[in-house]
Image (spheres, coloured by chain):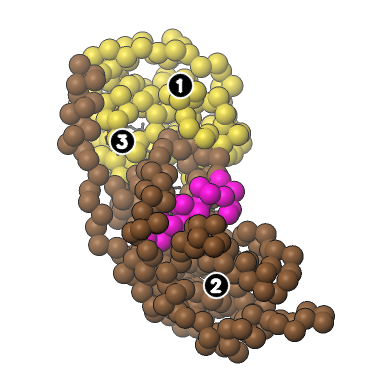
Amino acid sequence: MTRLLATLMLVTLTLPAQAEPVSGYAFLDDSTREMQDDDFSNPGMVAVDRGAELFHELRDSEVHSCSSCHGENGEGMDIKAIARYPVFNANLGGLVTLQERVNYCWEINLDRFPLTPGSSELIALETYVRHLAKGETVNVQTDGDMAPLLARGEALYNTRFGQLDMSCGHCHVQHQGQMLRGQRLSQGQANGFPEYRLGRGRITSLQQRLTECFVSFRAEPFEEGSPEYDLLELYIMSRANGLEIETPAVRF
Amino acid sequence: MRGRSVRSLLWLGLYAACASALADASAQQAYCEWQSADFAIASPLCGLDGDPARGRALAADSHGGNCLACHPMPIDEEPFHGTIGPPLQGIGARYSAAQIRLRIVDEKQLNPMTIMPGFYRDPALANRIAGEFWGKTFLSAQQVEDLVAYLVTLK
């Protein structure tokens, strides 16, 4: 009997079809929007400035900085290509996030010791580069080589984790728009990352945000730069296809 | 700004590991097996008696049951009630104590898709539980019984 009821419920309560993507911006109050919209009051611009410094930095006896290849103000960078990240690049071993791509240049082209995933330098550089593509539409590849990786990312997104036994989809698909105590659940979109978090007082990468969600339902987070987080990043970013890049967004 | 900092406290506090006296009371107790039949758990967990006043406090405590995170409840002194689950006003008129017990212990027996956590589910069933919560149920048997005792009063 229990089994019968369970099956019936599975049939009737299938997940709602993916609605139109809506940026987390739509869930903000006016004062937070104003803060994001004005470069002088957006606290995330500090990370952009720090990224710009690193972008130009020449260390002892070095002949190249990022700007030697990508232009003084990054104008050599194809912003449509930035809006494609994470990308599939067979030469770099398959799935590559923007942080990983930046770190690749850092290590191979600048011949420096690679940065730690999630380090403040790497996040500052990621913020600087993605900010160049602000206003561009997120456009992650979903077919070809990416299709099987996306399916794995989506499976992780819908896996229950932790003592509270919840999946990402529970909050950000099934219950989006509803109140979790004082917080309205958004679609958990990634178009504003790295973003400035008022509640934390710091710039936050997408994978750091995932860790916060994992901790909130008492699950053991994955490591930044792990295959699981990269697959989740891919799937989450693909949900944002069609939304404008807002980096650095301001969120609570 | 004040609204924001209140929200911030609530969110940071949501399910955060904490040393709240409420959450820790009898949390060390061993896991008691339970049996469900006819969509209910007839016997109190570990044979314990619940206290409705403690149950009410737990429902609102963001380090305790935090039922308010998802359910509107007749706890008017608390400002923010979630809207993810159904209002619990009147639950005691709709369900018996035994039916309420199963819903708190493991709502997934009724709806396998639900977001509602099983507050006294066998911890061995959890996937990738954070180290500090390993082998523990979300609430203790006593806390579940306190909540049952409170919810049956919501006629």
Chain of the residue under the numbered disc 2 shown in the image: A
The magenta stretch spans which residues? A222-238
Looking at numbered disc 3 in the image, what kind of residue is underneath it?
Thr
| Mark 1 nearby-residue class (10 Å; few <14, some 14–19, many ≥20) | some
Q: Which label number is shown at residue B122?
A: 1
Front residue of B129/B151: it is B129
Chain of the residue under the numbered disc 3 shown in the image: B
User: Residue at coordinates 28% horizontally, 17% vertically from top-left?
Assistant: B40
Front residue of A192/B69: it is A192
- The lab-note entry on whether marks 1 and 3 share a chain reads yes
Looking at numbered disc 1 in the image, what kind of residue is underneath it?
Asp
Q: Which label number is shown at residue A127?
A: 2
Examine the residues drawn in magenta and state their main secondary structure: helix
Residue B133 as seen in the image, left or right of residue A237: right
* Residue B133 visible, this orientation: yes
Looking at numbered disc 2 in the image, what kind of residue is underneath it?
Thr
Chain that appears yellow? B
Q: Position of residue A4 (x, y in %)?
A: 19, 21
Q: Position of residue A41 (x, y in %)?
A: 52, 81
Chain A drawn colour: brown
Where does label 3 land, which residue? B114
- The lab-note entry on whether marks 2 and 1 share a chain reads no
- The lab-note entry on whether marks 2 and 3 share a chain reads no
**Magenta stretch: includes residue A120:** no
